[in-house]
Image (cartoon, rainbow, N blue to C red):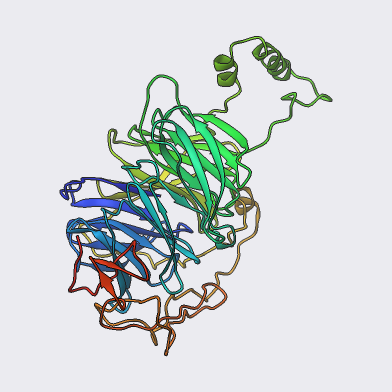
Amino acid sequence: MEQKEGAGGSGGPNGMICSSFNQDFTSLAIGTTNGYRLFSVTSVERLENIHDSTENPDVYIVERLFSSSLVVVVSLAMPRRMNVYHFKKGTEICNYSYSNNILAVRLNRQRLIVCLEESIYIHNIKDMKLLKTLLNTPSNPTGICALSTNHSNSYLAYPGNSTIGEILIFDANNLRTVTMIPAHDSPLAAITFSSSGTKLASASERGTVIRVFTIPEGLKLYEFRRGMKRYVSISSLAFSTDTQFLCASSNTETVHIFKLEQHSPSGCDENSPTWSSYMGKMFTAASNYLPSQVSDMMNQDRAFATVRLSMTGKKNVCCLATIQKIPRLLVASSEGHLFVYNVDPQDGGECVLVKQHRLFGVVQEENEAAPEPEVNPPASQSYAATVAKPSMVPSSSAVKGYSEDGGAKKGEVIPEHEFAASPVCLDDENEFPPITKRFHNGLCSVLQNGSCQCCPEILRTPAKLEVD
């Protein structure tokens, strides 16, 4: 769900360095040479600029926790330090420094994952306590990893090999390795979980085949062919919230949408034979006598729908969201635009561009018409059902995130050996777990040779102290 551009900090033409959608695709975060921005993407016609921050320049990682006020930021100026902010109050909750550059951060309501090139850190998001350190992981220079957004199935996926596409599945709740999936012959390029955490999609550096596996078993469910003529660099994979569709974007001009549907073994209905059904039977029978590479290619599904972008050779991030009861494809480009396309969930085909927003140049886009109400359909509502169901009155309740009666002063840290006198709670206890913390102004109790005895793998420092 994240793309990075301009490792040296120059960014794109508008100073854009990275972009990412939040876990339920209701918000877009972008990192720039000046700081970071948060947008609401719950309306087609109106792009609301929720927050602008210029405190940290050259932000190359920015991740928001669902619709809460918690945001994680990493800057090229201090690539080994992770800052956790309450952006609505403008305060820093805590910061952590690591032994090497941070390559990726992933969040759900239970865990916060920090990925370095050869190690992964698993924190409890309630109090930021370090729960587990995975050391000496296979070299992962691009920080490829995924965390399921469903905290009940809190699985972590990361490369199990630096030369072939093996995926290690780790249970981030119970802190144990679950399985290893031999997904591809070449190294991994992208992985992502479905919203339920029961499916995992993967693509290799070749970018020609995308596979979907069951979790935690690791069994192959689907195999989709993105293309045959050329190898591409897939930069983004995302399931729809109902797991009926999967989208993939790359450094080419085409975004592919695949439909996850089971085919009958015969490929047709025995009671109503047609010419196409006979042809399907013929190809199925013939594939049994062909070399495995050829038969595998014949059994791979093609894209259900596509989008042709006006740019090529650029990274972008995409997602499938239901906005105002209609399925949409959202594409955030590194050139500073957000494209909104309509998706036909029945027939697929070429998606229709309905709106293009600028992410730079205006603080908030104004429309002559009155702003449309923001509608957040239930996550369980399927893409097909969004077309068939009658209109619903939008709920007036909204998740506000962290309450205004808690939080930390800027520069303070969360030591794991102290407990809360005044808890930092979330407004909606049913939506998010409570957070319990106490803060102090110094380091952990004993430091020896630059490391902490109670958490030797990681040094947590006040803002004024840095450990490189």
Q: Position of residue 352 (x, y in %)?
A: 44, 41
| Nearer to us in this view, 217 or 369 | 217
Q: Does residue 194 appear left or right of residue 277 in this picture?
A: left
The residue at 46%/58% (across/down) is: 23
Q: Quadrant of residue 190?
A: top left
Nearer to me, 361 or 261 = 261
Find the residue positioned furthest to the right.
271
Q: How many marks?
A: 0
Q: Is residue 50 left or right of residue 290?
A: left
Looking at the image, residue 127 sits to the left or right of residue 52; the answer is: right
Q: Is residue 464 above or below residue 214?
A: below
- Can residue 157 be seen here? The reply is yes
Q: Quadrant of residue 37?
A: bottom left
121 or 276: nearer the viewer: 121
Asked if residue 238 shows in the view, the reply is: no
Residue 348's image quarter?
Answer: top right
The x and y percentages for residue 323 are 49, 57
Is 326 situated above or below 210? below
Name of the residue lying farthest toward the front: 448
Extreme residue toward the bottom, this view: 421
Point 30% across, 56% down: residue: 61
Which quarter of the image is occupied by the C terminus?
Answer: bottom left
Residue 64 in the image, given as x and y percentages of width and height: 38, 63
Residue located at (49% from left, 30% from top): 184
Check the image and report above or below for 164 versus 110.
above
Q: x, y (%) of residue 321? A: 49, 53
